[in-house]
């Protein structure tokens, strides 16, 4: 498979310096770019592609690439996740942690919502409390699991009280959980909030303009935006929904679309050589994983999961599906999430981790030992791009190799998104692919997801020792203690494999020859990246 589908060697170049990754075995060479050349002027508008239409842009239900990359430019959080993966104040001008169970936020004065009203502490309280309300059923409920109250404690002050210390809570307020919306808008819109008719009313550099279902969503520059450093350079940005990967690439080539995140990997070589624009790669926290969503079937035995991972030719998939842009992963998280860990801890992280090198014979023997004998498993997929197809086919081949009978179920991109939000959509599904990013710079965002009862624990996996390690990591504010508990959780997860890690890959973004200014980084899901895009000189 790899020999037949691997991209021809080509050097992806950019105007900025970055970390070089040499070509190997006919893989695409690539380097990471921190920032594309600065814009030389403003634009009337630009057009951007997404691979699917959001089902909503309500922040309480936005947990995927299409809605988040749009909302990042419209709504803002108390803190900001920066492209270099650091965190800084945002709508909260400052914050304090006076006790292990108390966080106090001073709200920035002079900030206006898109309807012209001023941001107040009441808006912050109403916005955060939605994540606590069972009636909302927010996808961000888990980061709020230790929150006992969110209260206005001053004219421009909000205090969050925790039931127990939580080292991750404050970090999450730089992402979706920290989103602030007008309390009046939330009350007025009710259940219609975030739909194509009502949109949203936030404080970001762009405001919601219009949404034509099935076609596009348009934002317009908010001229009263509070932060001059991130004031939008374009008067408008139009997001077009292009589910077909070939259509997206052709739109880049023709100039019909000015840019897009998540470039189809089979087009890396093509877009790296085109005169229509430039392909860039940036820092990421994403690991491609197969989620084990049914532990009541044959994959309920950890030995079968281990065998399946050993039977997957991950290097072949990376070469064939992603042009070699990335690395096989021995963990469910990327190395850059350990930035706050002491050096000694970082160095020892991978030493004791279980490894699963490609070994079909050993995998088949282990599966037979676990009783595999032709049982059926269902693998869900969606025709997002060739990479997704190649991964799914390779996983099915591996399942066959160890004695299982795989069935591939392909669904639309919109329905595939519901696998992450609706348990009913996962009924009858044993495996599905995710390119899982973290929303904070901390491995606990991944490992906390796998704790018993967590929203993102799609297979309802449960391990008491793992839960205990997660609890210790969450409770530890000390970086060394936090990292040590994180590492213990990681070791258990890699032995039990509730998810199967495949490989890491950098963020990809294509900019047409009209535009520049973006900072390639996974932070585009929460950082107002579109505001930085302007005219190219």
Image (spheres, helix red, strand yellow):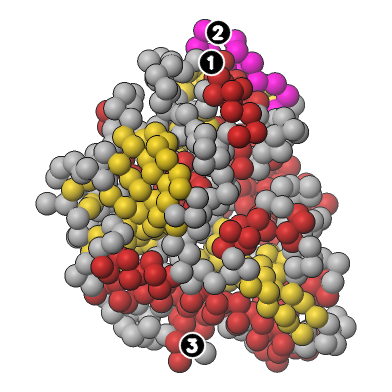
Q: Residue at x 61, y 22 (%)?
A: 187
Q: Which residue is mark 1?
A: 121
Q: Is residue 489 left or right of residue 348?
A: right
Q: Which residue is mark 3?
A: 2
Camera-nearest residue between 272 and 240: 240
Residue contact between numbered discs 1 and 2, judged by CB atoms under 8 Å:
yes
Residue contact between numbered discs 2 and 3, judged by CB atoms under 8 Å:
no
Residue 509: x and y in percent read: 35, 60
Mark 2 to mark 3: distance in Å? 61 Å
- Which segment is the magenta one? 146-159
Residue contact between numbered discs 1 and 3, judged by CB atoms under 8 Å:
no
Mark 1 to mark 3: distance in Å? 56 Å
| Sequence-wise first label, 2 or 3 | 3
Q: Quadrant of residue 513?
A: bottom left
Residue 411 higher or lower than 43, as above or below: below
Q: Residue at x 73, y 59 (%)?
A: 425
Residue 37: x and y in percent read: 20, 52
Q: Main secondary structure of the magenta part?
A: strand
Mark 1 to mark 2: distance in Å? 8 Å
Camera-nearest residue between 365 and 134: 134
Instruction: Residue 158: say if magenta.
Output: yes
Q: Which residue is mark 2?
A: 154
Residue 409 higher or lower than 76, as above or below: below
Residue 216 higher or lower than 500, as above or below: above
Q: Is residue 128 visible?
A: yes
Q: Quadrant of residue 144?
A: top right
């Amino acid at each position: 498979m790899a020999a037949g589908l691997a991209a021809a060697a080509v050097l992806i170049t950019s105007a900025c310096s970055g970390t070089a990754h040499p070509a190997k075995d006919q893989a695409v060479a690539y380097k990471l770019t921190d920032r594309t050349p600065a814009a030389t002027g403003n634009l009337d508008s630009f057009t951007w592609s997404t691979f699917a239409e959001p089902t909503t842009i309500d922040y309480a239900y936005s947990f995927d690439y299409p809605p988040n990359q749009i909302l990042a430019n419209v709504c803002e959080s108390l803190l900001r996740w920066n492209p270099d993966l650091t965190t800084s104040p945002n709508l909260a001008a400052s914050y304090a942690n006076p006790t292990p169970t108390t966080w106090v936020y001073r709200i920035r004065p002079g900030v206006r919502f898109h309807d012209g009203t001023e941001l107040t502490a009441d808006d912050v309280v109403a916005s955060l409390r939605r994540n606590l309300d069972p009636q909302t059923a927010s996808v961000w409920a888990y980061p709020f699991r230790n929150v006992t109250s969110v209260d206005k404690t001053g004219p421009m002050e909000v205090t969050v009280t925790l039931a127990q210390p939580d080292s991750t809570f404050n970090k999450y307020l730089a992402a979706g959980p920290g989103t602030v919306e007008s309390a009046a808008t939330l009350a007025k819109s009710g259940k219609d909030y975030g739909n194509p008719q009502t949109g949203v009313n936030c404080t970001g550099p762009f405001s919601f303009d219009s949404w034509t279902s099935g076609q596009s969503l348009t934002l317009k520059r908010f001229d009263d935006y509070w932060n001059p450093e991130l004031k939008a350079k374009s008067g408008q940005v139009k997001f077009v929904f292009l589910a077909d990967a070939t259509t997206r690439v052709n739109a880049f080539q023709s100039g019909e679309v000015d840019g897009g995140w998540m470039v189809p990997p089979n087009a890396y070589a093509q877009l790296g050589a085109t005169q229509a624009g430039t392909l860039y790669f940036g820092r990421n926290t994403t690991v491609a994983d197969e989620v084990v969503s049914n532990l009541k079937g044959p994959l309920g035995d950890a030995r079968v999961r281990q065998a399946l991972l050993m039977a997957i030719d991950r290097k072949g998939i990376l070469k064939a599906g992603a042009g070699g842009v990335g690395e096989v992963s021995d963990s469910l998280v990327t190395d850059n999430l350990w930035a706050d860990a002491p050096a000694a801890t970082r160095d020892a992280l991978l030493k004791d981790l279980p490894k699963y090198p490609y070994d079909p014979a050993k995998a088949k023997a282990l599966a037979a030992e676990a009783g595999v004998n032709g049982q059926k498993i269902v693998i869900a997929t969606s025709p997002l791009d060739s990479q997704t197809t190649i991964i799914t086919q390779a996983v099915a081949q591996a399942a066959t190799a160890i004695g299982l009978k795989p069935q591939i179920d392909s669904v639309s991109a919109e329905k595939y998104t519901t696998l992450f939000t609706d348990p009913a959509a996962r009924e009858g599904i044993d495996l599905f692919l995710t390119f899982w990013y973290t929303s904070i710079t901390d491995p606990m965002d991944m490992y906390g997801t796998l704790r018993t009862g967590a929203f993102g624990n799609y297979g309802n996996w449960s391990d008491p020792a793992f839960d205990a390690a997660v609890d210790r990591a969450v409770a530890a504010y000390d970086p060394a203690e936090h990292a040590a508990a994180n590492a213990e959780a990681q070791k258990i997860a890699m032995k039990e494999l509730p998810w199967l890690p495949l490989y890491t890959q950098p963020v990809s973004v294509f900019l047409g020859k009209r535009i520049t200014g973006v900072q390639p980084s996974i932070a585009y899901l929460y950082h107002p990246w579109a505001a930085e895009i302007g005219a190219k000189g």
